[in-house]
Image (spheres, grey):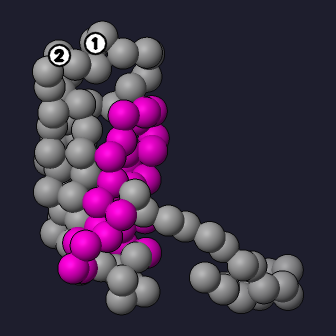
Amino acid sequence: MVTQVPEIDQTHHGFREMDFTKSRPGVEVQLGKYAFMVYNVLAKMTIFARQGIIDSGLEIVPMLSLAKNMSTGVSYFEQMKSDLEYRGESNIDIPVLVLGIDV
């Protein structure tokens, strides 16, 4: 991905990847920090959609009951659901299914 940065008169060559794509949806499995879960859904999937690579997304995250048994700061489904409800919709959003998993 190449972007012109006029403020510094340079070109930025960026690299992003998804866990995998299959017939247009992009899939991310996030068992890590909260910030990465939010970035996946609200930024990365939008970027991939604008590039014509995906048209929808699937974010797989732990449920709170599973996250409690993991390291600190792990994202979880209930947190993402609440944040998305408070945030509301945006005109740049794409359809994303957030799937919570548990043992």
Q: Nearer the viewer, residue 100 or 79?
A: 100
> Which image quadrant for residue 32?
top left
Q: What element carries label 1?
A: loop
> Which image quadrant for residue 15?
bottom right
CA separation, marks 2 and 1?
6 Å
Q: Position of residue 5 (x, y in %)?
A: 74, 83
Q: Disc 1 designates what residue? A: 68
Which residue occupies 71% across, 88% down?
4
- Mark seen at residue 65: 2
User: Furthest-right residue in view?
Assistant: 9
Q: In this view, does 12 lie to the left or right of 79?
A: right
* Number of on-image labels: 2
Q: Where is residue 103 in the image (x, y as percent from the top left)?
A: 14, 21
User: Furthest-top residue in view?
Assistant: 69
Q: Nearer the viewer, residue 67 or 20?
A: 20
Q: Are marks 2 and 1 in contact (CB under 8 Å)?
A: yes
Q: Is residue 13 left or right of residue 94?
A: right
Q: In which quarter of the image is the N terminus?
A: bottom right
Q: Give the range drawn in magenta.
A: 20-47
